[in-house]
């Protein structure tokens, strides 16, 4: 609030005027648009919103329905392996399991293979904290001061590389896909690189520098749940070894919910699979290492195509359609009210 | 001098009291009430987003909104538009407030801040936070999104919703309002892009490197950011729309009055004057000429002439009866019959304000002005509220 005039009369002196300036801003007389919710603006806004949402919703639903997805839960199908894995002293015993499925039609286009986990809370606060990004950048970081505890060093003082609970619990099942072609089984070629963010692989994760990778990690040990050290994650490809391993990078990107999927492999489009996956019988051969029964988790393997609007989740399209319908109905309601009350306008109406 | 220095408000002329009370007093109350409600809503809605996430992260206290967004949200991104609206918003124009002094009753009755309005506001905040959480949740459910790639759209949606909510509540839009809203949104994107492009390890534990840049290239981000504010604000917008037609408050009627063409406005106010004269509980009338342009030239002299008008002369008489206590010993006061009702005004006021609407006519007794306003019998029915029947409601659309 401001006073109209705040000068104090003084006798016999020239009064310096302390009035605020007579500008539009200080006198609160700025030109202003005063929107009024009259019938034209209201109806146009509701109907425009309604039509826009309906169109977008229909497009999104159509594109989500065009995604082909096969999701198989293999934690039940591999029950012997899961029982074996419940006992941690069996950690060095291998266990393989096979899951069959049939494609009735060809799947055309780029196909992505994901592993899915259910009831695994990667978004737990202390789990999310438990990493050392400086170490993952290849620096000689002091991991004792990081949040990696208790996964920092062994009792004999050897530091873990990489440290932290996220790295320790990496998903270590191996999934291969085989195609039954004319009574022979061929392995579907898969791409194991190119599945992570470019910035992650090239900026955020760097191997420590040395003349070779095993010497770069000299003096460190693998985390307790790992079977091989970090510099043996992928011996075939130097660019996929160490911290910059794609599976490792993808796992370190902690997911937002307890039910999630991570990109594992992509179908390599060569030979018979140049257009996608032809129809027929397929088999997943899984080397089951990741125990999920203790926390009632489930594991899935998912094959899916992708479209511009994400995956096969039609929720957003449905939300748009519902909103468009609601807005259009509200527009009709307002029109009805307006028509009913309009007759009450009498002699003042022009 | 000491009284002036010790006072909250000091006015040198008694006639300024009218504008101080009716206009600035009313604006002060309405700005304060609306901003307090909005402030509670904004904070409740934003924190509730973090609360809903606890159901899906094992109640571990994990936050999907990055720490720097949490810090800057209330400080940088959503504070400026709220500040501008709280300082500059005029819910009813000054002319109408002076012409219809009954509107001041809304402040006396605390009509802008009732307990039920507060709780409805909180329920609205709850609903909006549910929408702003669950639409991104179901969109990204069972996908490969990571915590902060999901939390950044949620923050963006929250910001859009909060600013659009303010946009629905703001009654006057100056260029400052527009620029503060657009600036806040642009500032958020700028800070997010710079923060997500700066050093990849300097911001533990989240280290959201390149998250926003990737999101800006994802069409689902934009679709989610468009649908969520629309769904969140649809009930409130519908309520405001229907309120203006079906059950408008006195203030809304005042706003609608100011938007009418001048002839209709004059007619309506005259109609109200006629109705008032039947009641005689009114000490003063809604007597003023609302048409700025046409009366600016009339000013002082015109009121002494008998100009043809829609009002009947008996209007002035009956109003004078009600103005029995308006007689004032002060000689400066001049009572004149204006075509639009009884007017008492000070002669020294007019020459300086011939062009300004709010001073073209006004009623005040210099001595008892303040008490007159305050001592309006509380139980008195105001013609503004009761005499305006459905016909006028239909008019005041």
Image (cartoon, helix red, strand yellow):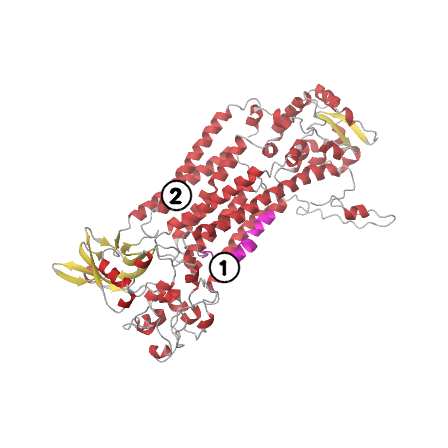
Q: Is residue A167 left or right of residue B120?
A: left
Which residue is located at x 20 percent, y 51 percent? A105
Query: Distance between the Cα atoms at labels 2 and 1?
Result: 31 Å
Could you tell me which quadrant the N terminus of chain A lies in? top right
Which label belongs to residue B67? 1
Q: Quadrant of residue A291?
A: bottom left
- Does residue A85 belong to the magenta stretch? no
Q: Nearer the viewer, mark 2 or mark 1?
A: 1
Q: Is residue B309 above or below residue A187?
A: above
Percent x, y of residue B92: 62, 37
* Image disc number at residue A320: 2
Q: Classify mark 2: helix, strand or loop.
A: helix
Q: Which chain is mark 2 on?
A: A
Chain to which the residue tagged by mark 1 belongs = B
Residue at 56%, 46% in the rendered image: B40
Q: Quadrant of the C terminus of chain A?
A: top right
Dominant secondary structure (helix, strand or loop) of the stretch shown in magenta = helix
Q: Position of residue A61 (x, y in %)?
A: 33, 45
State whether residue A76 is above or below residue A321.
Answer: below
Label tally = 2
Q: Quadrant of residue B372?
A: top right
Residue B384 is left or right of residue B206, and the answer is right
When the figure is inspected, residue A77 is found, relative to residue A222, above or below; the finding is: above
Q: Position of residue A233 (x, y in %)?
A: 31, 71
Question: Which residue is more in the foreground, A141 or B323?
Answer: A141
Residue B17, visible in the rendered structure: yes
Residue at (75, 35) in percent of width and height: B370
* Residue A117, horizontal then vertical, whole percent: 32, 57
Magenta residues, start to end: B62-84
Label 1 element class = helix
Say few, some or many: other residues with alpha carbon within 10 Å of mark 2 (under 14 / 14 to 19 / 20 or more).
Answer: many
Asked if residue B77 lies in the magenta stretch, the reply is: yes
């Amino acid at each position: 609030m401001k006073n109209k005039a705040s000068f104090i009369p003084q006798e016999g002196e020239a009064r310096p005027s302390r009035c605020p300036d007579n500008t539009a801003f200080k006198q609160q007389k700025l030109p202003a648009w005063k929107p009024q919710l009259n019938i034209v603006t209201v109806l146009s806004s509701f109907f425009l919103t309604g039509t826009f949402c309906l169109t977008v919703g229909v497009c999104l639903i159509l594109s989500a329905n065009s995604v082909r997805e096969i999701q198989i839960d293999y934690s039940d199908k591999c029950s012997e392996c899961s029982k074996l894995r419940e006992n941690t002293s069996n950690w060095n015993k291998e266990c393989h399991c096979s899951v069959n499925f049939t494609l009735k039609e060809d799947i055309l286009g780029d196909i992505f293979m994901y592993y899915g986990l259910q009831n695994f809370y990667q978004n737990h606060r202390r789990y999310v904290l438990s990493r050392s990004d400086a170490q993952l950048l290849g620096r000689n970081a002091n991991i004792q001061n990081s949040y990696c505890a208790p996964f920092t060093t062994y009792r004999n003082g050897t530091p873990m590389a990489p440290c932290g609970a996220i790295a320790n619990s990496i998903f270590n099942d191996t999934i291969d896909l085989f195609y039954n072609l004319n009574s022979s089984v061929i392995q579907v070629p898969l791409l194991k690189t190119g599945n992570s963010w470019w910035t992650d692989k090239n900026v955020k994760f760097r191997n420590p520098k040395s003349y070779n990778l095993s010497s770069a990690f000299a003096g460190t040990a693998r985390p307790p749940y790992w079977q091989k050290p970090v510099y043996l994650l992928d011996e075939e490809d130097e660019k996929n070894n160490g911290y910059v391993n794609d599976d490792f990078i993808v796992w370190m990107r902690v997911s937002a919910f307890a039910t999630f999927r991570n990109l594992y492999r992509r179908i390599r489009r060569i030979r018979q699979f140049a257009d996608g996956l032809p129809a027929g019988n397929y088999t997943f051969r899984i080397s089951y290492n990741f125990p999920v029964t203790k926390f009632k988790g489930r594991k899935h393997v998912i094959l899916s195509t992708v479209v511009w609007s994400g995956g096969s989740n039609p929720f957003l399209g449905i939300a748009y359609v519902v909103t468009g319908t609601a807005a259009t109905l509200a527009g009709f309601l307002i029109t009805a009210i307006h028509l009913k009350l309009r007759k009450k306008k009498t002699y003042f109406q022009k | 001098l000491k009284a002036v220095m010790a006072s909250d408000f000091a006015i040198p002329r008694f006639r300024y009291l009218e504008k101080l009370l009716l206009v600035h007093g009313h604006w002060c109350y309405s700005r304060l009430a609306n901003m307090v409600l909005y402030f509670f809503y904004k904070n409740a809605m934003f924190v509730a987003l973090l609360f809903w996430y606890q159901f899906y992260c094992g109640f571990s206290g994990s936050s999907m909104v990055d720490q720097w967004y949490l810090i800057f949200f209330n400080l940088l991104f959503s504070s400026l538009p709220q500040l501008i609206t709280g300082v500059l918003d005029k819910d009813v124009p000054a002319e109408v407030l002076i012409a219809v002094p009954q509107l001041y009753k809304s402040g006396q009755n605390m009509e802008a801040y009732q307990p039920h309005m507060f709780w409805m506001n909180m329920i609205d905040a709850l609903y909006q936070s549910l929408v702003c959480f669950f639409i991104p949740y179901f969109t990204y459910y069972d996908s490969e999104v990571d915590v902060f790639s999901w939390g950044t759209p949620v923050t963006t949606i929250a910001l859009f919703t909060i600013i659009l909510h303010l946009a629905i509540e703001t009654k006057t839009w100056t260029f400052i309002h527009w620029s503060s809203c657009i600036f806040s949104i642009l500032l958020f994107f700028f800070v997010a892009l710079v923060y997500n492009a700066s050093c990849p390890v300097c911001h533990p534990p989240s280290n959201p490197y390149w998250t926003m840049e990737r999101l800006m290239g994802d069409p689902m981000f934009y679709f989610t950011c468009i649908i969520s504010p629309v769904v969140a604000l649809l009930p409130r917008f519908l309520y405001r729309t229907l309120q203006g037609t079906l059950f408008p408050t006195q203030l809304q009627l005042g706003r609608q009055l100011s938007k009418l063409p001048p002839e209709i406005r004059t007619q309506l106010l005259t109609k109200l004057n006629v109705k008032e004269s039947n009641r005689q509980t009114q000490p003063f009338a809604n007597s003023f000429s609302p048409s700025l342009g046409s009366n600016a030239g009339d000013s002082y002299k015109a009121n002494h002439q008998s100009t043809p008008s829609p009002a009947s002369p008996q209007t002035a008489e009956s109003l004078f009866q009600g103005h029995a206590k308006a007689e004032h010993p002060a000689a400066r006061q001049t009572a004149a019959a204006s075509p639009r009702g009884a007017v008492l005004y000070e002669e020294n006021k007019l020459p300086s304000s011939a062009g300004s609407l709010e001073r073209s006519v006004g009623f005040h007794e210099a001595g008892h002005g303040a008490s007159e306003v305050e001592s309006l019998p509380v139980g008195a029915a105001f013609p503004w509220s009761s005499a305006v029947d459905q016909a006028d409601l239909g008019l005041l659309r």
